[in-house]
Amino acid sequence: MMTETKSIIIAENVHKWYGKFHVLQGVSLSVNRGEVVVIMGPSGSGKSTFIRTFNALEEYQKGSIIIDGITLSHDLRNIDAIRQEVGMVFQQFNLFPHLTVLQNITLAPIWVRRWSKAKAEELAMQLLERVGILEQAQKYPGQLSGGQQQRVAIARALAMQPKIMLFDEPTSALDPEMVREVLDVMRGLARDGMTMVVVTHEVGFAREVADRVILMDSGSLVESATPDIFFTNPQEDRTRQFLSQIL
Ligand code: ADP
Ligand code: MG
């Protein structure tokens, strides 16, 4: 049995280039078990690229990333192990349109985990209840609202029983009236102790739920602070400037 370290994500001095473009310029971040970290920053600052390295959706060229004791090697050797530990929710929900809600959620548990259909469906129904859309199980994604689809996407990620959930602007594609129902689900997850890294500009959510808020700019981590300090008394001019644009 592996000893449980306090930090479940340890990213150290991570560098990545897209061709000649140095998109991640030595970013370090440790996340403790059960911690909720919100990442903010201007468009193009590398937020998506950074969190996508945590589940090997993006390679990186220098530095190290250790997820729950598993070294995410540059050659992506541990990719299957990592993908089971780290769930991800995207801005565009990325559901399979030709599968029902229930099929979307049970697909990976059946094919990757080799669970029986009955076992996968039992967990799926529990998760649909948890995200508040049990009655939509037999519908297709196209028959649901954006907020409902995003809640299906969250349930689908949870179906693999990940230890970490990554959210990349999960409410940015939603109509305003649907933002809240998705944030409420995320709040519940945080309350239940899920480790979460969330890229979002929802200041209310960050203030209420985050243990730490981080500003990224131009491929670097500018500031990391408790929400209280981040929003009321940031230490960096760049953070103040960013906040003046979004608040
Ligand atoms: P953010 O999520 O903060 O908006 P991204 O991580 O998506 O930023 O992108 C950071 C930078 O990397 C942007 O300038 C973007 O254009 C560039 N970029 C993202 N993906 C690619 C790619 N596949 N190839 C080349 N450049 C990319
Ligand atoms: Mg992004």
Image: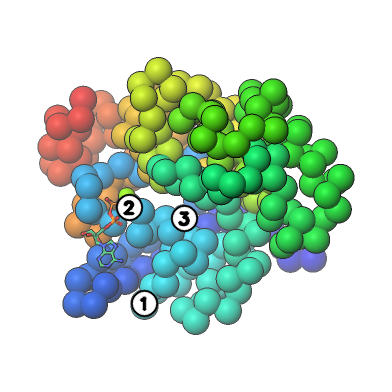
Upstream in the sequence, badge 2 or badge 1? 2
Location of residue 4 in the rendering, given as x and y in whole percent from the top left corner: 69, 58
Between 235 and 56, the one lying in front of the other is 56
Circle 2 packing at 10 Å, graded few (<14), some (14-19), many (20+), is many
Residue 187 visible to an observer of this rendering: no
Give the secondary structure at mark 1. Answer: strand
Circle 3 or circle 2, nearest the eye = 2
For the N terminus, which image quadrant?
bottom right
Location of residue 180 in the rendering, given as x and y in whole percent from the top left corner: 45, 21
Q: Quadrant of residue 233?
A: top left
Q: Disc 1 residue type?
A: Lys
Give the secondary structure at mark 2. Answer: helix
**Disc marking residue 192:** none
- For the residues labelled 3 and 2, the Cα–Cα distance comes to 15 Å
Check whether the beta carbons of the residues at disc 3 and disc 2 lie within 8 A of each other.
no
Location of residue 202 in the rendering, given as x and y in whole percent from the top left corner: 35, 29
Residue 26 visible to an observer of this rendering: yes
Query: Dot 2 corresponds to which residue?
Result: 47
Q: Disc 3 residue type?
A: Ser
**Residue at image location 65% in from the left, 51% down from the top:** 162
Q: Disc 2 residue type?
A: Lys
**Disc marking residue 30:** 3
Query: Dot 1 corresponds to which residue?
Result: 62
